[in-house]
Amino acid sequence: MTSQYVPTRPPTTTLWRPTGPEELALVEAADRRAWPPRLPEQPIFYPVLNEDYAIRIARDWNVPASGVGYVTRFEVDTAFLARYPVQRAGGRTILELWVPAEELAEFNRHIVGRIEVVHEFRPQS
């Protein structure tokens, strides 16, 4: 009887990111495996730690700003994320990670699997 080596996946943390159509198109162009570089006026990349907060941003900010808002979900190597302290941006569930723009390529290398769209919001008629 032979044993086969089965690689184990490192523990991951689920993150969410509210996004508009332009950023999502860039994610799709990267085969849903990476976030695009930040623009000069965007010094940080901020994924959020809970789905409800991402939904509120996508629905209440992205829809008025760009006509559609998406919530994405993705997994990142938990050990890597330890370098980013959780930031409270409001109430106790308004939690984000602040990834400096210059570290986004390294952050992308620690995404496990693909970035998936889990919600889509459009203006209500």
Image (tube, rainbow, N blue to C red):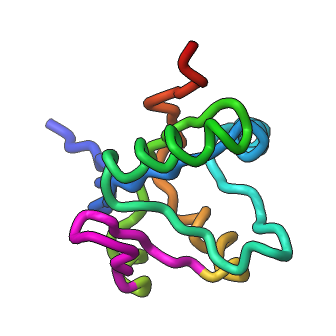
Location of residue 3 (image quadrant): top left
Q: Residue furthest left?
A: 1
Residue 15: x and y in percent read: 39, 55
Q: Nearer the viewer, residue 99 or 107?
A: 99
Vertical arrangement, residue 13 with respect to residue 22, above or below: below
Question: Residue 55: where, in percent of width, then height?
Answer: 41, 42
Question: Does 29 sit left or right of 117 as displayed?
Answer: right
Q: Position of residue 125 (x, y in %)?
A: 57, 12
Q: Nearer the viewer, residue 68 or 116?
A: 68
The structure residue drawn at horizontal position 59% and vertical position 24%, both measured from the top left corner, is: 122
* Residue 95 colored in magenta in the image: yes
Q: Residue at x 74, y 73 (%)?
A: 42
What residue occupies the far front of the structure in this picture? 125
What is the x, y in percent for residue 40? Answer: 85, 75
Q: Is residue 90 magenta?
A: yes
Instruction: Indicate left or right for 118 with 27 as reference.
Output: left
Q: Is residue 106 left or right of residue 91?
A: right
Tell me if residue 37 comes above or below residue 57 in the rendering.
Answer: below
Counting labels gives 0
Is 46 situated left or right of 75 in this image? right
Give the position of the N terminus as an image quadrant: top left
Eyeballing the image, is 125 above or below 92? above
Q: Residue at x 51, y 32 (%)?
A: 117
Residue shown at the point (62%, 44%) measured from the top left: 62
Q: Which residues are magenta?
A: 85-99
Of all residues shown, which one is farthest toward the top?
125
